[in-house]
Structures are given as C-alpha cells and as structure tokens.
Amino acid sequence: MLDPRSWLKAAQETDEGRKRRVDHDCGGGKTLIVSNGERGWSAFCFRCDDQGFKAKPQPSLAERIARRRAEQEQDERIASSVALPEPINTDVASWPGKAAVWLYSAGIGIPEIARLGAYWHEPSARVVLPVAEGDNLVYWQARDPWWTRKTERPKYINPDVNKQHLVASYGRGDPLVLTEDVLSAFRVGEFTEAWSLLGTNLTDQVLARIIRRGGPVRVWLDGDAAGRKASRRILKQLRSCGIDAERIETPMDPKKYSRRQLPSVIGLNASPCPEDA
C-alpha cells in the first residue's frame, strides 16, 4: 500500500471526478495517477506497481439534508426559465471525467458534442443538452452524470414549461424514427430524421405534427419493460391514424449502436443525412 504522504495531497488537489498524472517520490517522471472520486481519493504508481486509497469523511444526516435542500433550491431556480443555465463551459477537456464519458459512451465525441451544443454547468454539476426549433431555444435537459438509482438527486432537471408539443428533432429523410432520449435521436439523426419524444409519451400535439409531416414512422424506444409497453401504445396511436408505423426492437438503446450498425438496424444504406455528409 502506498504511503498516503506520497500521494494524498495531490489527489485532494484534483477536481472531483477527475484523475491526473503526477510525480511520485520513487523517482522521476509522472508515474503516479491520482484521482478524486465520489467516495474517496486513490492513487496508483506504475513504477511501484502499488496503489493507495483513502475514504472521504461521510457527511452527517443533517449535512446531507442541508446539502440536498440547497441543491433542490438551486435546481428550482435554474428550472424557472427556458434560458440556458449559466455559466456555459464547452471546453470538454476541463469537464469532470464522468461528464465526458457519459457522452462518449453514447458514441458522441468532441465534434458531435459541439454540433449537439452540449456543455458542462458547474453550479448544478450537470451536462446540459439544448433543444432548439430552428434558431429558437425551446427547451433543455440537464443530466447528472453520476446518477444511479441510489442517488438522491434527480437524474434530469429541465425548465418548467409545457412540452406537450415539443420534440428534439435531428436529421432529414424517411423513415421518421421516434426515440425516447435526446442522445438517441441525435445519433439516429445522422442517417434519417429522428425525434426524441423527451420521454415515452406521444402527445396529441406531436401526433398532429407527425400526421402533417407524412411518411413512414419507426418507433425505437429503449428495450426495457417501460420502453416495450410505451412502444405498443404509440404504435396503436399511429396506426389508428393510418400512419405506416413499425417498431424497431433491439436489446440496446439506439445511442449504443455504432455508425456502422445504425443504418442496417433502421433499414437504410450507410450514407449519412445530406446535412451531415
């Protein structure tokens, strides 16, 4: 076990959620990786082939309640406006590792992050995804990249607006693919038109938009029980209006498929949309 005196200070000076290489007292060169995690600080030295860990002090119940109350008040302030939360940090290299990895794991790299308009919002510790119609900002989602089912914080926060008529729309072409989340719609939108329903409900207002648009529709929601149930309900809505609608059923979410795989899953050739070519 590494002596904490040789690495702990460097780990504590590292931003939470990030890791970095530093010198170790065993010799020259940055052979030591230190990290600041949610539960503690850790280190590993390649030359020593050894590691270290120190748990962070656990907050008291009163401290956890006070922190959660402060977070809720901040979330409510941010959600009171459709304006994008500020400050806006688009320098991905300065983001916490978890924030960037959340996007990378959905097949969204640096160029795609810029096209998507995603950014890091430090005060809320969330990745913000703007949703626009034309040149107008109409909505946004802010995702906690550390979220788990055990997390007290909500997975997403968003502006308190009527979103019955809203979708996050990307790409052009047929078929129109309906997805649950923004990242899935963005990825599918590389090859055809895709709308995120911002959830699993097809509202009457969005259904009317689909009817006006015309053309075939493919419903590609997440493969969990909730997604399968919602897909059946949405197919029934679409078909009752005479729309050519089919379900795309896959074990993974749309955003988890590669650029090579997506066209064949959708039933297209491998050419990207004209606007992305």
Image: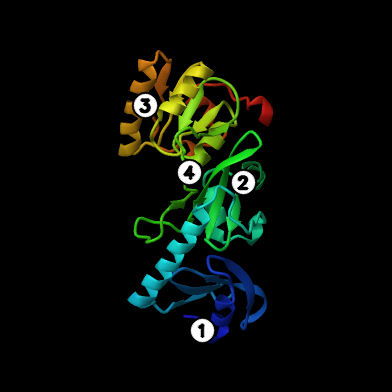
Give the numbered dot on residue 234.
Answer: 3
The answer to whether marks 4 and 2 mark residues whose Cβ atoms lie closer than 8 Å is no
Give amino acid for label 2: Gly
Residues at marks 3 and 2, CA–CA distance in whole angstroms: 31 Å
**Marks 3 and 4, the one that precedes in the sequence:** 4
Residues at marks 4 and 1, CA–CA distance in whole angstroms: 50 Å
* Residue 27 screen position, x and y as percent: 65, 81
Tell me the residue at 57%/31% (across/down): 189
In the visual, does 264 lie left or right of 238?
Answer: right
Give amino acid for label 3: Ile
Q: Nearer the viewer, mark 1 or mark 2?
A: 2
**Marks 4 and 2, the one that precedes in the sequence:** 2
Q: Residues within 10 Å of mark 1 (few under 14, many from 20)?
A: some
* Residue 50 screen position, x and y as percent: 50, 75
Q: Secondary structure at mark 3?
A: helix
Give amino acid for label 1: Pro
Quadrant for the C terminus in the image = top right
The answer to whether marks 3 and 2 mark residues whose Cβ atoms lie closer than 8 Å is no
Q: Secondary structure at mark 1?
A: helix
Q: Nearer the viewer, mark 4 or mark 1?
A: 4
Q: Nearer the viewer, mark 3 or mark 4?
A: 4
